[in-house]
Image (cartoon, rainbow, N blue to C red):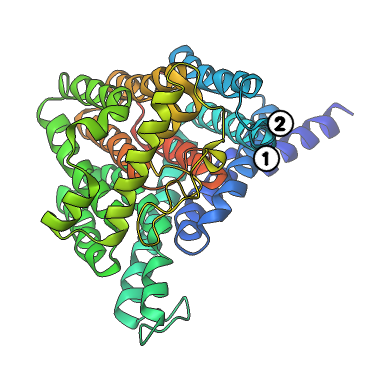
Amino acid sequence: MKSTGLSEKTGLSCLANPAIFMGMIAVLTPIFTLYLPLSLAAILPVGAVLLFVCRFATGFPKLDLDPLPLFAVGGLLCVVALSAFWSYDPQQSIERLPRTSLAILAGIIFIAAVKGMDDRTTRISSRFFLAGMVVALICILIERTSGGMLSRYSITGDSLSYFLNQFNRPLSILSVLIWPAAVLLARRHWALAIAAVGIYAAFLPFFVSTAAMAAIAVGAVIFGAVYILPRIAPIIVGLTLAVTVLAAPTIDHYLPPPKKLLESLNLPRSTYHRLLVWEFTTQRIDERPVLGWGFNTSRAIPGGTTNLDVSEKALPLHPHNAALQWRLELGILGALFGAGIFLVSTEMARRYAAGRVARAGAVAAIGATFVIGMISFGAWQTWWVSAIFLIAGFTVLVCRRRPPG
């Protein structure tokens, strides 16, 4: 009888091996990011559930939750929920709240589960992640040189714009994930890491993804700075990101009018539109500076559907800037907790990274995520929230120092 019970327990432990599930998530996430980026909204909760079940079935210790990140993320979520009471459009707030809350909860579980992995599971999962990134980068090269052979789009005629635009989301995420991948490659040989980042960066201009190019450039600067000054640079980066979040609503005070920038710098219409959106957003922030307009109300802000120029709407769904969206919708508290997330993240990287290279890669990933969040997606898009937690999880997987024993 005891033998049968022991056999069943052993079989369950083998079936629920976290190395299998985490390896599968790690290798598939970069590939799915390239072709089905919206699927990240499903990958995160599925991964969180699988890893949680693994920990329960194999008798692993309790989930490892750091109080500082939990306070920052939990505080922002509390402000999100409370803002429904004073929301300009309560329906918009309440409809989005469950999805955002579940994504954040899944993200917390995912990161905590990754932190609790043993050395063997970490090594195996890291290799799978690197394999997934290599496959994704090879696919990018094939797609660009073949004109979309794998995605089955031609770069001729009117389809060129579509072919390029379909990779905006994927390349933005991969421009962040490249940094933990570079850490893994650097542990083997610096030349491999430099070659991977260099080749990837060299192909980005062919896809015309401004956000991805900015993320890789900022990430490279931060990586170099943190590698040279491993103790002080993460603190400087964290403070800079936090101050930038808090100062974002003053953007229209220190920039010339968007029309003047368009004419003097010959900006693309898309960039001009983004500047118009930010100017309009800061004006609406001034109307409700303390509490904000309420969670997820950007699409309902008065005047948001008005054209500020030929076809440029004042606020199309969201400000394309997380700092402005936090301040617009959640007021001062939202901005403070948002700034706190970046400050705490860089501090966690400074404290717990496994060496100089890992610290540089972790802070570079945080800086690159900041860039994407400040010029691209809506702060509450479920796939983007999920992507942030997946990025954080893989960065922890690769860069975190393992506790002794």
Residue 354 shows in this picture: no
Q: Secondary structure at mark 1?
A: loop
Give 88 or 178, whichever is nearer the viewer: 88
Which of disc 1 and disc 2 is earlier in sequence? Answer: 1
Residue wearing tag 1: 16
The residue where tag 2 is placed is: 57
- 256 vs 338, left or right, is left
> Which label was assigned to residue 219?
none
The reply to whether residue 8 is visible in this rendering is yes
Residue 336 placement: quadrant: top left
Furthest-right residue in this view? 1
**Within 10 angstroms of label 2, few (less than 14), some, or many (20 or more) residues?**
some
Q: Are the residues at dot 2 and dot 1 in contact (C-beta closer than 8 Å)?
A: yes
Residue 223 shown left or right of residue 48 in the figure: left
Q: Residue 77: where, in percent of width, then height?
A: 56, 23
Q: Position of residue 303 (x, y in %)?
A: 49, 43
Mark pair 2, 1: CA separation: 7 Å
What residue lies at 21% left-to-right and 62% top-to-bottom? 199
Instruction: Give the amino acid type for the residue marked by disc 1 in the picture.
Output: Ala
